[in-house]
Amino acid sequence: MTKARSAVLAAVDEASGPVSAGDVHGILGENADLVTVYRALHWLADAAYVEEFAFACEERGVERYYVSKRHPHGHFFHCEGCHRFLPVEGCFAGEIVAALERERGFKVLTHTLYFTGYCPDCAAVRAAPGAGRDCGEPPTGAS
C-alpha cells in the first residue's frame, strides 16, 4: 500500500464517524492533495478497507462518506444544522435483521444506520425566538 493510501486509511480509521473526502483532506493538510485523497478513498473502498455510502443533506446536497471497516458497523445521527455525524450507541436493528433473514431469506452481513434531524445544541438555537432555519457553525469543541 502506498504512503498516501496508508495516510488516508489512518485518517478514516481514527475518525469517530463518517468522513468525506474533504474531511480527510482537512485532516491530512498539506500531506496530500484533494485528488490524491479521492483516488486513495476509491481504492480503499474497492479493496474493502473502508465502507462508502452516499448521503443527502438539504444544505450540502449528496456527498459520499467513508467509514472504517475496523468498526464492524455503526449507527449515526446527522445534524442538519451543524452537519456533524454523532455516534448512536447500541444496535437497534437486531430484530429488523432477524426478520429480514427469516421472512425474506436475506443473509445480512453488516448494516449502517443513520438518523437525521437536529442535535441538542442546534435544536435549542432553532427553538429560540427569532431563530433562523439553521443553527450555523458547529458548537465550540465540535469535530
Image: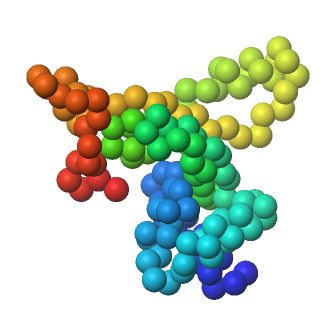
Where residue 15 appears, as percent x and y from the top left, is: 47, 60
What's the residue at 65%, 46% (across, down)?
A: 53
**Residue 8: x percent and y percent?**
58, 72
Q: Is residue 102 left or right of residue 141?
A: right
Tell which of 16 and 66 is nearer to you: 66
Q: Is residue 17 left or right of residue 46?
A: left
> Is there any visible trace of residue 22 in the rendered image?
yes
Answer above or below: position of 12 versus 81. below
Q: Closest to the observer: 92 or 6?
A: 6
With 82 as the anchor, is 85 left or right in this view?
right
**Is residue 97 found left or right of 15 in the rendered image?**
right
Residue at left 57%, top 43%? 62
* Residue occupying the far left of the picture: 129
In which quadrant of the rendered view does residue 7 lie? bottom right
From the image, which quarter does the C terminus lie in? bottom left
Above or below, 117 relative to 27: above
- Which quadrant is the N terminus positioned in? bottom right
Name the residue at 66% across, 51% down.
52
Residue ranking furthest to the right: 105
